[in-house]
Image (cartoon, rainbow, N blue to C red):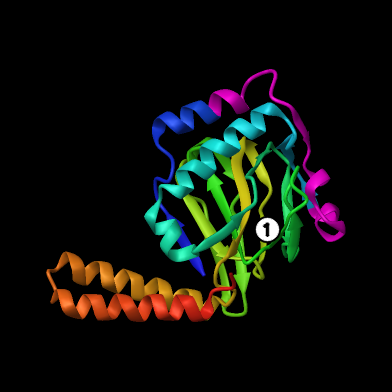
Amino acid sequence: MFLRVPRLLSEGQLATIGAALHSDSAPWVDGRVSAGHQGAMVKRNQQLDEASATARELDDLIVGQLERTPLFISAVLPYKVYPPIFNRYAAGMHFGNHVDGAIRQIPRTGQKLRTDLSATIFLAPPESYDGGDLIIENDFGARGARFEAGDMVVYTSTSRHRVTPVSQGLRVACVFWIQSLVRGDLEREQLFELDRTIQQLTQSGADPESLVRLTGHYHSLLRMWSEI
């Protein structure tokens, strides 16, 4: 999966997040504190202290917005969401090629999460920094993501990915992981396509009885493939 969710965050939400992250009291720490052994060797950035009150307030804002975003719900079918980690890259910082760990422990809960999908929300305008492109690779090639502030990209967590070196300005973003109700990428994408088709047919005034049957097939497949 490689999915762009445009305008996830409003201008007001971006302003709230920006004020908190650019405050002199924002508790920034070395980004390697959240990296595994492989990631720590290639990671050079800073992140907001996950245990701080600022991080918790911003986490609630982001997760609340995700819950109100139909495209995210339809495509991802979220079961658990890891609290977003806010990071920044100044000149010379980067994150080399790596793969996200399969399991993460959710802070303060002891619960574990399987990382089916990874997500990045861009929090700085792309013209405000040079470099800092997110490059996502799979067996079919590489795709770059350098989107507008407030946009999100979601991609399969097994993908190799990196953030290219920033040469000027400040790249600010947040990242998080999702455990989906449906483990398999193929099955999840089939459900997403079926849901989009149902929505399009509904908007076009298709036969209501046919829509009910098609919706029934969707939920039968979801029931068969979900893991709860």
Q: In the current view of this chain or complex, which residue is farthest to the top?
A: 24
Displayed quadrant of residue 36: bottom right
Above or below residue 94? Residue 140 is: below
Q: Please name whichever residue, 181 or 19, is drawn nearer the observer in this view of the structure.
A: 181
Question: What residue range appears in magenta?
Answer: 18-42
Residue 227 relative to residue 203: left or right: right
Residue 144 relative to residue 207: left or right: right
Q: Magenta stretch: residue 156 in it?
A: no
Q: Please name whichever residue, 221 or 118, is drawn nearer the observer in this view of the structure.
A: 221
The picture places residue 130, in percent across and down from the top left corner, at 58, 42
Q: Which residue is mark 1?
A: 162
Amino acid type at image mark 1: Arg
The picture places residue 42, in percent across and down from the top left corner, at 81, 54
Q: Residue at left 45%, top 32%? A: 13
Q: Residue at left 69%, top 37%? A: 91
Q: Is residue 56 visible?
A: yes
The picture places residue 171, in percent across and down from the top left corner, at 60, 39
Above or below residue 158? Residue 42 is: above
The picture places residue 218, in percent across and down from the top left corner, at 37, 77
Q: Is residue 123 visible?
A: no
Q: Quadrant of the C terminus?
A: bottom right
SS assignment at label 1: strand
Displayed quadrant of residue 216: bottom left
Q: Residues within 10 Å of mark 1 (few under 14, many from 20)?
A: many
Residue 210 relative to residue 118: left or right: left
Q: Magenta stretch: residue 38 in it?
A: yes
